[in-house]
Amino acid sequence: MAKTLLDLDEDLLAEATAALGTATKKETVMEALRQAVESSRERRQRALADLQEVADEGGFQFDQLDDLDR
């Protein structure tokens, strides 16, 4: 694990610590990063699932793309 020196907003860090239920600055930052990455992954997975659903329902007109190439 890399060591990094950060300037953190102490008020924001305290609020995050309380919200996350963590005990240390390191735990707070690590948990916030984990949650941010997890949230991003979930959003991408939902977006892909939504696109797949639209595709399965015939919502894309791919034949129109062929017409644009001409």
Image (tube, helix red, strand yellow):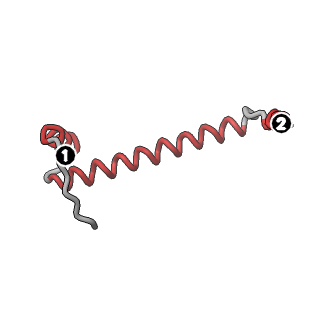
User: Disc 2 on helix, strand or loop?
Assistant: helix
Left or right: 30 in relation to 18? right
Toward which corner of the image does residue 64 lie, by quadrant?
top right
User: What residue is disc 1 on?
Assistant: 21
Left or right: 14 in relation to 40? left
- Give the crowd class for mark 2: few <14, some 14-19, many >=20 residues within 10 Å: few
Residue 38, position as x, y percentages in the image: 40, 49
Query: Residue drawn at (71%, 38%), measured in percent from left and top?
Result: 55
Q: Is residue 37 above or below residue 4?
A: above
Q: Amino acid at mark 2?
A: Asp
Q: Which mark is residue 42?
A: none
User: Disc 1 on helix, strand or loop?
Assistant: loop
Mark positioned earlier in the residue sequence (2 or 1): 1
Q: Amino acid at mark 1?
A: Gly
The reply to whether dot 2 and dot 1 touch (C-beta < 8 Å) is: no
Q: CA distance from mark 2 to mark 1?
A: 53 Å
Left or right: 61 in relation to 10? right
Residue 20, position as x, y percentages in the image: 22, 44
Toward which corner of the image does residue 2 lie, by quadrant?
bottom left
Query: Residue drawn at (65%, 41%), measured in percent from left and top?
Result: 52
Query: Residue drawn at (53%, 41%), measured in percent from left and top?
Result: 46
- Give the crowd class for mark 1: few <14, some 14-19, many >=20 residues within 10 Å: few
Residue 1, position as x, y percentages in the image: 28, 67
| 2 vs 1, front mark | 2
User: What residue is disc 2 on?
Assistant: 63
